Image (cartoon, grey):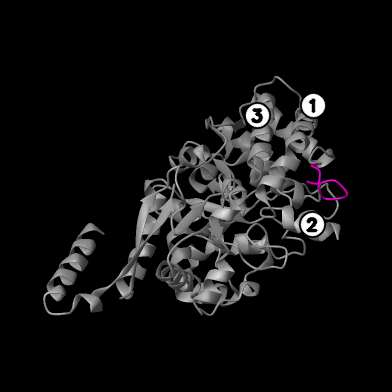
Amino acid sequence: MPRRRFATLASFLSLSVAVPATALAVTEIDFSHQLDGIRAARLGELVERFNGQSKDYRIRLVQRTDDGAPAVLNLATPGNVLDFASRRASFRPLHKVMSAAREKFDGRQFAPELRVRVADARGNLNALPLAMSTPVLYYNKHAFRQAGLDPEKPPRTWWEVQHAAGKLFDAGMRCPYTSSWPAWVHIDNTSVLNGGDLAGPKGNTLAFNGLVQVKHIALLASWHKSFYFKYFGRRDEADRHFAAGECGMLTSGSSLASTLRDSPALDVGIAPLPYYDDVYGAPKHALADGASLWIGEGKKPAEYKAAAKFVAYLVAPETQVELTKLGGYLPMTPAARAAADSRLLAPDLDGLKVAYAQLQHEGASHPLRVSQIEPVRLIVEEELEAVWDGRKPAKEALDTAVARGNAVLPAALLAANGVCCGSELAQRRR
């Protein structure tokens, strides 16, 4: 990538002698992010492809800082999207930018489950759902073979996960099962997949302390005591331990499949998120989540045109295929999904097919999600850690999490100003 940049710069300098300066005017805009090195490099590849084919515009990746005004382009991750939403006046709605630039763009073509957190009450997109995934179960096929398990028959239910974890532990593995993103996987998705409630009857209070959730967290607590489940942290810490071959099973985002595929030492299988077969109607559906692209307010007209061109490039089916290859993310539109299905190889499609299948059910656009409201997510994960440490039983921890969460929920949703649940809840109350 550096050689390519130097080559582009050299070409520019050689042309500047012969061509008038006005003909070489290029609008440069910053793309702010807080990604780690690997993810930033993958995003950089996508940006370089755009820069290589654009004569008038150039995107420059920069690390986001917590102070100062937003850049022209800004990447929000699941962990900081509420911060973006609380500063809504600092960002220009995406649909307005695209309309002013006269770029062909229809937010209604995006799947409903991808528009949940970035659309306003009328369904217009305020931001682009750029890198979305659903939680899945990864399992180490080599470890399964050593434990006498069939690597072509992954666990379907949590009871089967328990059986597999026991076999892995008996075979000497000290991390039979682990999980990243506990609030997203074990509260949001496990609740919805098994028909449990996240919100109260009116949709404006939390209610994730029902029978399904208590049973699930109590089961995980028993696994933690018996060393079947190992907890590494609140974010994606468990991903790295699984990738290193330390763990037999992992629940994490479907986008991780592309990273694991690059590890030649791993033979990884991918299966849907487990469910409870003793719950009527299960499994139902999973919930997509991921990064979104926001456009800063107060920029120059030329900069907004550059942003619109970049967004149009991102939503093109061929770019969506590349984004899926690079990061394993769900294509955003039906056309992009069809292109991905026809152009990707079978190994590349494994995680994608599992992620798709979990969304093909009515209700996959469930509005209120614990993991998307940062103050609530922190409370939930603190209470879950009290369970893993043996300081609280599952029911007490979940009851406390709901009570504490409801105390901060109104202010959190008010700060979000209609984004990330507020607008959808308002629609449901009408």
Task: Report the quarter where the N terminus lies.
Answer: bottom left
Q: Earlier in the sequence, mark 2 or mark 3?
A: 3
Q: Which residue is mark 3?
A: 382
Task: Report the quarter where the C terminus lies.
Answer: bottom right
Q: Earlier in the sequence, mark 2 or mark 1?
A: 1
Residue found 77% across the figure and 46% down from its top:
276
Q: Amino acid at mark 2?
A: Ala
Residue 96 place in picture, x, y as percent: 57, 70
Q: Which residue is mark 2?
A: 426
Q: Which residue is mark 1?
A: 396
Mainly helix, strand or loop, the magenta region?
loop
Q: Pick the residue in front: 109 or 391.
A: 109
Q: Is residue 189 left or right of residue 12?
A: right
Which segment did they paint magenta?
Answer: 198-206
Q: Amino acid at mark 1?
A: Glu
Distance from disc 3 to disc 1, alpha carbons, whole Å, reads: 13 Å
Q: Pick the residue in front: 216 or 167.
A: 216
Residue 142 place in picture, x, y as percent: 48, 45
